[in-house]
Amino acid sequence: MSLDMVFLGPPGAGKGTYAKELVKLFNIPHISTGDMFREAVASGSELGKKVEEILKRGDLVPDDLTISIVKDRLSKEDCKNGFILDGFPRTVDQAKALDEILNFLGRELGYAFYFEVNEEVVVQRITNRRICKNCGKIYNLLTMPPKVDGKCDVCGGELFQREDDGEEVVRNRYKVYMENTYPVIEYYQKQNKLFTIDGASGVDSVIKEVLNIVRR
Ligand code: AMP
């Protein structure tokens, strides 16, 4: 089966954390649309200007913009052996567009992993999430705190909180997820590509489960 995979689940399900570990094992790229949008905002590009306010509110960037950046990215050479798409698709139209893009490239999605967690876990995880400015490592102040306050264990970089990780915006992101992204799960279920994993079971256990499914 192809290593073309999507990671689904609410914000805070751990998609980014699992993807970062798994791409090292599979030697394929981690493609996060959220990261791509944040980079665009930071660089002050045209795309960045269009999406900045949308990201601050926790709403969805329009499908046409999102689909076009994903199409460009998946056409790059480093995706030829597979990829982990994290945070895309978030609407059924995006899921349909992904099928078309892959079809155009002569390939087919292998797995849709759905990391299931409830709203209270999401809020607790995200409001306590801190990220290294330098290497991107993700911490949780309650469950996975850095050894030294505000500093990355790996590279000593400064830790920061994402602008959209405050409680109010997180609750909106969860609502947007339930309305728009939950139907994507059904979409993949119908295609027999959905694998549901308990996103609250801990990083090691989640990674093991994904590996068992992929190596089956
Ligand atoms: P994330 O890092 O995946 O939580 O994404 C951060 C923000 O980027 C989201 O709250 C959206 O505003 C935007 N975003 C990321 N991926 C998508 C997508 N597939 N469709 C629409 N908006 C997205």
Image (cartoon, grey):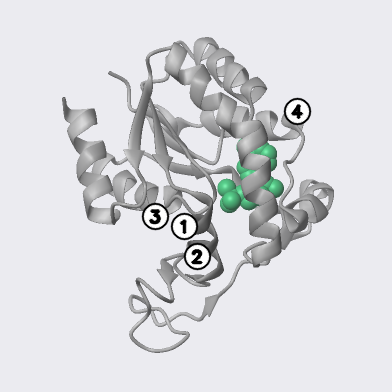
The front one of 78 and 33 is: 33
Q: Label 1 vs label 2: CA separation?
A: 5 Å
Circles 1 and 2: CB atoms closer than 8 Å: yes
Position of residue 119 measured from the top left corner of the image (x, y, whole percent): 53, 52
* 85 in relation to 192, above or below: below
Q: Residues within 10 Å of mark 3 (few under 14, many from 20)?
A: some
Residue bearing mark 4: 64
Quadrant in the picture for residue 175: top right
- Say which residue appears at 55% left-offset and 25% top-offset: 184
Numbered disc 2: secondary structure: helix
- The amino acid type found where label 1 is placed reads Val
Residue bearing mark 2: 124
Numbered disc 4: secondary structure: helix
* 140 in relation to 169, above or below: below
Label located before the other in sequence (4 or 1): 4
Residue bearing mark 3: 17
Q: Quadrant of the N terminus?
A: top left
Q: Label 4 vs label 3: CA separation?
A: 27 Å
Q: Label 2 vs label 4: CA separation?
A: 32 Å
Q: Quadrant of ligand 1?
A: top right
- The amino acid type found where label 2 is placed reads Gln
Residue bearing mark 1: 121
Q: Label 1 vs label 3: CA separation?
A: 15 Å
